[in-house]
Image: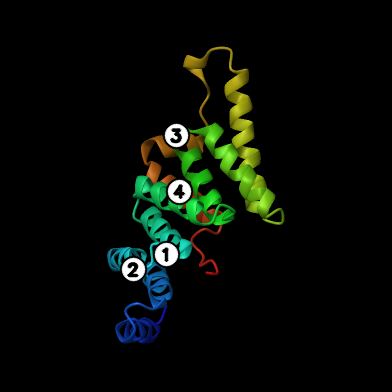
Amino acid sequence: VATDDIRALSDALAADPAGLAFVALGEALRRGGELDVALRVALRGAERHPERADAHDHVARVSVDRGELERAIVEWETVLRLAPGDAGARKGLGFICFQLGRLEEAAAHLGVALAASPEDGSLAAALQTVQAALAERADSPERSTTQVSRPALAAARDPCSAARAALAESGMCAARPTT
């Protein structure tokens, strides 16, 4: 992201603090790795526009990048209260729940997201992975010695990095269109 773009978006936000330039500015900052500034911009925007799902979605995505999964969950749940059919929020929640070992919740979120976006191959693959993990858990003769996959071990060691990697693989780090 070019510094000129960030400067232009910053100027637009300064000229109209109640406007929606915060979403594009925050996304540009997030993609540029300026996560602290991106979070401040996102939080201010969500505070000024609490009724906008895209404002809360942006806070959630920055929070995931910062490793703040609980904040991301709260924000995506807010998105779903405002826009119950938001597939992006379901997708994000599904990946976080998977990383946290909440497989049933992950499957539910990913299933709803896939129903809304059946062409999204990453969702189909993610749901298949979660369903396989659920089946493996159910088939395990001894729950105390359940086999754990490499991604699950990575998530146990560093759940934030594992969640960011899963989100990145699924395209969650890419900007999504806002409404």
Tell me the element at label 4.
Answer: helix
Position of 32 compared to 148: left or right?
left
| Label 4: few (<14), some (14–19) or many (≥20) C-alpha neighbours in 10 Å | many
Query: Hey, what amino acid is under mark 1?
Result: Ala
Query: Hey, what amino acid is under mark 2?
Result: Arg
- According to the picture, the residue beneath numbered tag 4 turns out to be 77
Tell me the element at label 3.
Answer: helix
- According to the picture, the residue beneath numbered tag 2 turns out to be 48
Is label 4 in contact with label 2 (beta carbons under 8 Å)? no
Tell me the distance, in whole angstroms, between the alpha carbons under discs 2 and 3.
Answer: 40 Å
How many tags in the picture? Answer: 4
Q: Which image quarter is the C terminus in? A: bottom right
Rendered view: 36 above or below 142: below
Is label 2 in contact with label 3 (beta carbons under 8 Å)? no
Label 3 or label 4, whichever lies nearer to me, is: 4
Q: Name the one closer to the observer, 20 or 35.
A: 20
Q: Position of residue 41 (x, y in %)?
A: 32, 69
First in sequence: mark 2 or mark 1?
2
Tell me the distance, in whole angstroms, between the alpha carbons under discs 3 and 4.
Answer: 27 Å
First in sequence: mark 1 or mark 3?
1
First in sequence: mark 4 or mark 2?
2
- According to the picture, the residue beneath numbered tag 3 turns out to be 153
